[in-house]
Structure formats: C-alpha cells, structure tokens
C-alpha cells in the first residue's frame, strides 16, 4: 500500500488516523464509560512513544557508525544502547497495535446485556464479544505485519529472549549493522533463533527501520478505515470526504527524513524480500511523505570476505556460539568490550 501525506493537503504528515481522531463526533465518545482516556489522547501518547523509539535507534546506530578503529584495527563497539533502543522500538510498535484496539473500544458503546464474558480481558477480545462491526477486518489486515515481529517481542517478554547485535565491515569502508533474537539449538549452541531466523539470518537496521516505519502508517491507515466503518454502522455517521488538520508534525518529520536517508544496503537474504520505501521532501511551502511497504527496487548486500563483530557475553555455561550467514566468508572478531 502506497500512502502519501503532505502538509499542504492534510495539514500535517502524521498518520492519517490522527486527523480523524481530531474530528470525532461527540455521539461516538464512550471512553469514560470504559475508564479510558479520550481516543486522541490514547493515540497521541502511543505515537509519541513510537516516534521517540525510532529516534533513539537512529541515534545509537549513528554513534556506532562513527566509532573509529583502534590501534589493532578493530573498533570498540558498545552494542548495549542499540539493543536497548531496538527492543523498545519493537515493544512500542506492539503496544501501538494494542492501543488501536483500545481506541476502537473507546468509540463503542458499553455492552451490558448480555454482559461481556469475564475472560475478555483484552480490548480485542472485548470488541469481538461486543460484535464490533469492523474489528475483525482490522485484525485480518494488520495480521501479516503483527505476526512478523510479535513473536520476537513475546519471547523477550515471556521466554527470556534477548536481542543480539551484529556489525559487518565490508571493504572498501562499508558497514552494515543489525540484530537477531538469540536462540539455542539442540546441540546447545547459541545463535540466531532457529524458528524465527532459520538459525542463520538477521535483520539489518537499514531495512528494519524502513519496514516498521512504513507499517506504522499502514496500520494507522487501517485503523482509520475501521473507525470510519464502525461509526457508519453504529451511529450512521459519515466523515467528510477529506479532513485537513493544521498541526505541527516536526517530531515525526525528523524521523522520516533520517530513515529515508539510510542506505539501501541490506543483509543477503533481505535482497529478495519486498523493499519498504520512504520518500521525504521538504521545502518552504510543503512537507511530503510517501511510504510503501511492498516496493521492489534494486538494493545492495555484502559479499566476499568481511569482518563481523558481535557481543556474545559469557554466562558460565554456554561454550559454543553460531553466527548468521554461514555461507559468507567471515573474519570473526568478538567485541572486546564484552
């Protein structure tokens, strides 16, 4: 899906659902009945967290990109800040999806007869029990994206999952950073998770940030569609054909611009995947942002002999480790800071 936002047309470049949440009819507001914030407040807080997470990952990635070689021709890389911010980004995106269901719930009247089952603890379950008119389609449309990263978040939260960073140096003077979820194979070797990464791949920051940012706009577009459909069926309310809301969106503009400037230099297995793209243009009169989750453009990937740096830390038990991309000739270097 190709999504275009511009300040001239839309008044801001926030995801489109923002304008609709700023234009809700009073009849649809049931947030206090559910002990929830106003739906716009839920969204604004959630989007701010996601935006800050993107910015933090970009900051840490930029710092690592500037680390010079030491006297042994080996950079001393501290991956912990990058992993911390990357984990926050994944968790904030999953929470943002969860908050979408809270927004839909805040716009649906409470159901008293028959009462909702006590097992419907989460907003998506409540909406299903309440027979919300558009939640099922919303869930269906965002499922491919959610399923692509939610298992990583769930393993981090509930199964002691840990992200691990890798850094590739490729002559002449090129580098590419990324991460993977650690997993232990049947031989007790620690490496990329067998089910989630096939045991030998990782996720490059250059592609991953584009992927999540483009999907942020797609998920929020689907949320807008779900709100429009629900209000039409529940309240017979029709939104205007176009909604323009004049608002300062510099926070997300800065993030969009920085992500758009990342090189199209991905890990080998990512070259054949659809390429999420992001185009950002700003001049004195307009800011324009175009995102597309499934573009197909030519991208580059590392090849030949490279140096890989990672930061496996000893745990007193594990004695063998596995690196991603075993078919590439690597010069392995363990992070000297760990």
Image: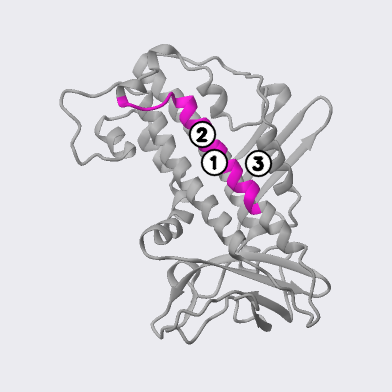
Q: Is residue 306 magenta?
A: no
Q: Which mark is residue 291?
A: 3
Looking at the rendered structure, which numbered label has been put on residue 239? none
Q: Which colouring convention does the figure follow?
A: one colour
Instruction: Name the N-terminal-most of marks 2 and 3.
Output: 2
Whether pointer 1 and pointer 3 mark residues with C-beta atoms closer than 8 Å, the reply is no
Mark 1 falls on what kind of element? helix
Task: Locate residue 306 relative to residue 205 in the image: left or right.
Answer: right
In the rendered image, residue 117, in percent from the top left (x then y), is placed at 18, 36
In space, the residues marked 1 and 2 are separated at their CA atoms by: 6 Å
- Marks 1 and 2 in Cβ contact (< 8 Å): yes
> Dividing the picture into quarters, in which one does residue 231 lie?
top left
The mark lying in front, picked from 2 and 3, is 2
Q: Nearer the viewer, mark 1 or mark 3?
A: 1
Q: Is residue 17 above or below residue 260?
A: above
Q: Dot 3 lies on which element?
A: strand
Tag on residue 49? 1
For the residue pair 233 and 335, the one nearer the viewer reads as 335
Which residue lies most toward the left here?
114
The residue labelled by disc 2 is 45
In this rendering, the answer to whether 50 lies above or below 82 is above
Q: Residues within 10 Å of mark 3 (few under 14, many from 20)?
A: many
Disc 2 and disc 3 in contact, CB within 8 angstroms: no
Q: CA distance from mark 2 to mark 3?
A: 22 Å
For the N terminus, give its image quadrant.
Answer: top right
Quadrant, the C terminus? bottom right
Residue 33 spot, x, y in % from top left: 30, 21
Span of residues in magenta: 34-57
Left or right position of 335 against 34: right
Q: Secondary structure at mark 2?
A: helix
For residue 322, say whether it is visible: yes
Mark 1 or mark 3: whose residue is earlier in sequence: 1
């Amino acid at each position: 899906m190709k999504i275009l936002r511009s300040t001239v047309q839309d008044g801001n470049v926030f995801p489109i659902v923002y304008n609709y949440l700023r234009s809700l009819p009073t009849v649809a507001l049931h947030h206090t009945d559910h002990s929830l914030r106003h739906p716009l407040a839920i969204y604004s807080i959630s989007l701010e967290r996601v935006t800050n997470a993107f910015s933090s990952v970009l900051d840490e990635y930029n710092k690592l990109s500037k680390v010079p070689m030491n006297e042994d021709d080996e950079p001393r890389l501290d991956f912990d800040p990058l992993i911390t911010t990357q984990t926050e980004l994944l968790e904030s995106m999953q929470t943002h999806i969860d908050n979408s269901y809270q927004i839909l719930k805040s716009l649906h009247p409470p159901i008293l007869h028959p009462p909702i089952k006590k097992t419907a603890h989460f907003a998506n379950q409540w909406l299903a029990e309440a027979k919300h008119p558009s939640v099922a389609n919303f869930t269906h449309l965002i499922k491919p994206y959610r399923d692509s990263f939610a298992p990583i978040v769930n393993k981090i939260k509930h199964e002691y999952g840990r992200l691990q960073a890798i850094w590739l140096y490729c002559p002449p003077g090129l580098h590419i950073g990324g991460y993977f979820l650690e997993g232990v194979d049947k031989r007790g070797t620690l490496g990329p998770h067998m089910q989630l990464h096939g045991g030998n791949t990782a996720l490059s920051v250059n592609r991953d940030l584009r992927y999540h940012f483009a999907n942020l706009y797609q998920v929020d577009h689907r949320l807008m569609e779900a709100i429009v459909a629900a209000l039409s069926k529940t309240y017979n309310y029709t939104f205007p054909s176009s909604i323009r809301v004049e608002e300062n969106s510099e926070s997300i503009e800065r993030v969009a611009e920085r992500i758009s400037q990342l090189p199209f230099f991905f890990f080998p297995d990512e070259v054949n995947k659809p390429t999420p793209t992001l185009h950002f243009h700003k001049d004195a009169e307009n800011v324009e942002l175009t995102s597309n989750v499934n573009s197909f453009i030519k991208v580059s990937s590392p090849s030949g002999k490279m140096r890989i740096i990672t930061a496996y830390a000893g745990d007193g038990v594990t004695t063998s480790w596995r690196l991603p991309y075993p078919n590439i000739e690597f010069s392995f270097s363990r992070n000297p800071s760990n």
